[in-house]
Each structure stands twice: as structure tokens, then as C-alpha cells.
Image: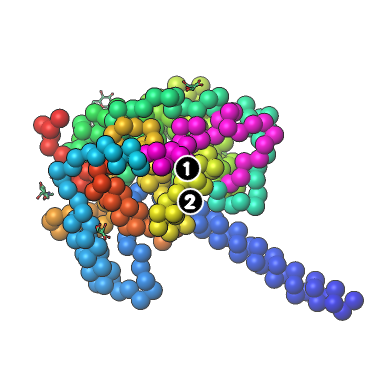
Amino acid sequence: MHVMKTLVLWILPVILLCSFCSVAFWIFLSNNNVSPNPSSKIPQKVSDTQSCKGCKENVFMSKALGNYSNRWKKNEANFKRFRSLLSGKCHAVSKAVVTQNNTPLGSNIIYDGERRKPIQVTQALFNILAKEQPFGNATWESCAVVGNGGILTNSSCGKEIDSAQFVIRCNLPPLDNRYEKDVGNKTNLVTANPSILHEKYSSLMERRRPFVESLRPYGHALMLLPAFSYGHNTAVSLRAFYTLEDFGSNGPLPVFLNPEYLRSLSKFWRERGLNSVRPSTGIIMASLALEICANVHLYGFWPFSKHLNDSRRITNHYYDDRQSKKNVHSMPAEFEHLLKLHKQGVVRIHLGDCQPTHR
Ligand SMILES: *[C@@H]1O[C@H](CO)[C@@H](O)[C@H](O)[C@H]1NC(C)=O
Ligand SMILES: *[C@@H]1O[C@H](CO)[C@@H](O)[C@H](O)[C@H]1NC(C)=O
Ligand SMILES: *[C@@H]1O[C@H](CO)[C@@H](O)[C@H](O)[C@H]1NC(C)=O
Ligand SMILES: *[C@@H]1O[C@H](CO)[C@@H](O)[C@H](O)[C@H]1NC(C)=O
Ligand SMILES: *[C@@H]1O[C@H](CO)[C@@H](O)[C@H](O)[C@H]1NC(C)=O
């Protein structure tokens, strides 16, 4: 009897508190899980002062620049080797998006950030899954993956970016004429993270037409929604899907990012020494491009607050200076890996300004 009382009085509240904390923790993580831009500060040790952060950044930057070359040349053998390694493990072409083929009716979708609570594929859910994988069997000749880093400001890279056959952008970035010269406006694929749906579009719980209208710049791009990363991503992502459908939108084609693909991709990068909790949208899109494109160009990937060879300060994004919250990604570590691929002639990272006349 006494034991029961103790249980009820003490243990239950503790359990409740714990589960509350873990929910809060996941919400915290997932609010941060989706920052699309590679621009964030070097992860800080607890004792970092402002100035020491600066000096660490300088050291990292000069090391990074030592591995960067403007005169890049593709190394076909390295490219093929890396690509077959990646596609052997991750199968982006058939797995990157949740489809009726890879996700049968009645099966469970296991969230990549929250394994314990799978969601069952009901008839209603099944009906809205893509009928087939959206990348076809085609390999695009050239792809530009556009991170949203402030390094794009005044870069004049818009034309060069738009000249790629397939252009991938992250997290519904602004493309209006203030930015077009630097970032272009062509979009074949764009990611839309739940955080932006919550922040910019009131979680799609209020008027939805502004959302539909704001998507016009993306034309008929594929819109990649990470609906199954965390349980609370699902409802808002489905609302985005239904909004486009209900408005008869002649706009982007919404599809769901496959958590199984994200799991295999995390594992792939972890095995290469990238120890962040989850890969950022930027490196996910770069990896996807490596499987579906013959030539991969990265723009707007530069996770530092200073320009590369002058000390011009750059903003966190090309469209604002909002700092990413302390997050689960390690942008500089990811950048180091991408830089390694640059050095090996596998991907081309563009850091300098583009020549308006070039190409
Ligand atoms: C640059 O390359 C060297 C040798 O490959 C490597 O040890 C170093 O970590 C790289 N630095 C950065 C910042 O990428
Ligand atoms: C891709 O190729 C496979 C086998 O070559 C074929 O079965 C499949 O229908 C093709 N898919 C598309 C979308 O073209
Ligand atoms: C970009 O160019 C404009 C106009 O020349 C200038 O005012 C602004 O300071 C520049 N921004 C950066 C980050 O270089
Ligand atoms: C992109 O910009 C060009 C002109 O620079 C314009 O003709 C085109 O309509 C724009 N595309 C979109 C989707 O806004
Ligand atoms: C940085 O240096 C490279 C090579 O030295 C040069 O081509 C480029 O114009 C420079 N960029 C800036 C912004 O100074």
C-alpha cells in the first residue's frame, strides 16, 4: 500500500516530467534541425569568448582556403567512385522521396528523428504519396545546389546558377528582383522545412492564399517536405500539401522526403567522420545532387562571417542576418567534408564572385 502511494506521489510525476522534458527537447531539436543554410558559426566550446571565436574562425578559414582552388578541374574517376559509393548506400533515385512504390499501403513509416513512433500508411496517406519516384532515370548534365549563405550577396552569380540544367534551392528562399542578380531565379527543386511554414505562414492555420501565392517564383519545382522527420512535422507538411491541392495550384509539386533515405545518408556521412546529429539540408541536397547529376556546383556554402579573401563581413543568409540557433548540425565540419570533395575534383564549390561575362 505504502509502496503504491510512493509510486503515485513521486515516481509518476518524475516520469511525467521526464517525458515532458524529452518532448521539449525534441521540439527544440527539430526547430533547429532544418536550418538549410551552411552559414553558421563554428561550434563554440563553453568557454569561448567573442574574440576567441573570431580567432578560431580565422584559423579554420585559412586552413579551408588552403584547400580551395578557383581553378577547379573535375576528376572523373574520383567522381564516379564517390557517386557509386553514395548511390550504393543511399539510392536517392528510388528512395529520396516517399512513393507508393517504396512505401506500401499498411506499412509503417519510421521517423528519422523519432524512431519510437512510426506512422502507419493509411489509404488516405497512401493516396497522396507520389506514384513514382520523381527523378526519372535521367542524369542531369549539370546541377546547381544553392545554399543560402551571405557569401552570395553581391556575387553576381545569378546567371551562372540559372545556367545549370537542374537548380536546387533550400527552404523557400526569396528570389525576387532584389536578389536575382546574385542568386538567379530558376528552381527545379526546393525544400520547405516545417519551421518556415510555422514562422512565415502561421503554421497554415490561418489564411492560406498568401502561402500559395508566395510559391509562384518556384514555378513547377518539386517541393520537398520533410514530413516524416519528427511527429510534429507531419500535420503541417500535410497541410502544405492539401493547401496546394485545394487551391488547384498550378505551382510546385509537393513530395515528402523519405526518412529512410535520411537515415542511410546520416549513416553514410557518419562513417566518413561527420559526427553531427543530423545532416543539414545543404549537405542532404548536395548528396542528392551527387546521385542525380553529372556535374555538381555548390553556391552559397560558406559557414563563416567574413568573406574569403578580404575581411568584408558577410551576413548569415543572403537575404537576412538571422543567426541559426545553436543547432544539431556542424556546418564547418560539413563544409570541411565538401571541401575535401572539391579538392578531389568531385564537386565544385563556388566561393568567389562570378564574372558577369563568364560562360
Ligand atoms: C585541408 O586539407 C588537409 C589535407 O588534406 C586536411 O588535413 C585539412 O583538415 C583540410 N582543412 C580544411 C579546413 O578543410
Ligand atoms: C527506370 O528504369 C527502370 C529499369 O531500367 C525501369 O523499370 C523504370 O520504369 C524506369 N523508370 C522511369 C521513371 O523511367
Ligand atoms: C553589396 O553592394 C552594395 C552596393 O554596391 C553595397 O552597398 C553593399 O555594402 C554590398 N554588400 C556587401 C555585403 O558587400
Ligand atoms: C526569372 O527572371 C526572368 C528575367 O530575369 C523572368 O523573365 C522570369 O519570368 C523569372 N522567372 C520567374 C519564375 O519568376
Ligand atoms: C579573391 O581572390 C581570388 C584569387 O586571388 C580573386 O580572383 C577574387 O577576385 C578575390 N575575391 C575577392 C572578393 O576579393
Number of the label disc, if any, that sits on residue 89:
1
230 left or right, relative to 96: right
Instruction: Give the labeled residue for mark 2.
Output: 267
Residue 67 figure quarter:
bottom left
Residue 155 figure quarter:
top left
Q: Give neighbour class at mark 1: few <14, some 14-19, many 20+ (Cα, 10 Å).
A: some
Amino acid beneath label 2: Lys
* SS category of the residue bearing label 2: helix
Residue 99 forms part of the magenta stretch: yes
Query: Residue at (32%, 44%) from the top-left corner?
Result: 147
Residue segment shown in magenta: 83-111
358 left or right, relative to 91: left
Q: Is residue 104 above or below residue 1?
A: above
Number of the label disc, if any, that sits on residue 312:
none
| Residue closest to the eye, 61 or 251 | 61
Q: CA distance from mark 2 to mark 1?
A: 9 Å
Query: Residue at (48%, 51%) from the top-left corner?
Result: 267
